[in-house]
Image (cartoon, helix red, strand yellow):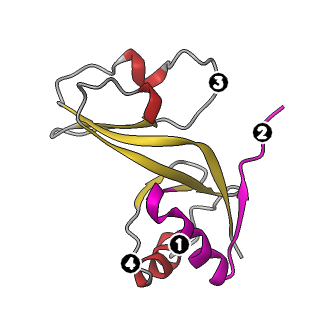
Amino acid sequence: MLSFEVLTDRYAICRLSPDDPIPPWAVRDGTNEQSFISLTWTPDELSIVCRESSVPGHVESEPDWTCIRVAGKLDFALVGILSAITKHLAEAGISVFALSTFDTDYLLIKNPHWPLAEKTLSNAGYAVYPLKQQA
């Protein structure tokens, strides 16, 4: 059974114009700590997921997200991982913003819904842990 690691920060999902360059605040927030950042550039928009505290007030954003990641690396041959996870959350009425990387999947859940999401995932047999700090 899969397990999840809960990232410690609060996150925001930002929308910029597709013509905008990647802004420095999105990739360097002054803390010199590693954190989760996702940049998705399409012909329609530049979407950025980053620490909520990094986002300037004038930027269009949706703040107050908790971010979890599937612990470990997922093989590309695995099928239905996100479907299985989001099925349980959808049945509980919890919306997610999902992202995938080369190694694993991340889910962002609005912070007010996080306690129910954590309970829902635990009841479905998933383990939910705080993120292990890297040495």
Q: Where is residue 89 in the image (x, y as percent from the top left)?
A: 47, 76
Kindly state the secondary structure of the residue where label 3 is placed: loop
Disc 4/disc 3 C-alpha distance (Å): 34 Å
Q: Which of marks 1 and 3 is in front?
A: 1
Q: Can you identify the residue that label 4 sits on?
A: 93
Q: Which amino acid does label 3 sit on?
A: Glu
Q: Which of marks 1 and 3 is nearer the N terminus?
A: 3
Kindly state the secondary structure of the residue where label 2 is placed: loop
Q: Which amino acid does label 2 sit on?
A: Gln
Looking at the rendering, the stretch of residues picked out in magenta corresponds to 107-135
- The answer to whether mark 1 and mark 4 are in CB contact below 8 A is no
> 69 above or below 48?
below
Disc 1/disc 2 C-alpha distance (Å): 25 Å
Q: Earlier in the sequence, mark 4 or mark 3?
A: 3
> 45 above or below 99?
above
Q: Which mark is residue 133?
A: 2
Q: Which mark is residue 116?
A: 1
Disc 2/disc 3 C-alpha distance (Å): 11 Å
> 8 above or below 89?
above
Q: In this view, does 54 lie to the left or right of 67?
A: left
Q: Quadrant of residue 90?
A: bottom left
**Residue at horizontal 60 percent and vertical 55 percent from the top:** 69
Kindly state the secondary structure of the residue where label 4 is placed: loop
Q: Can you identify the residue that label 3 sits on?
A: 33
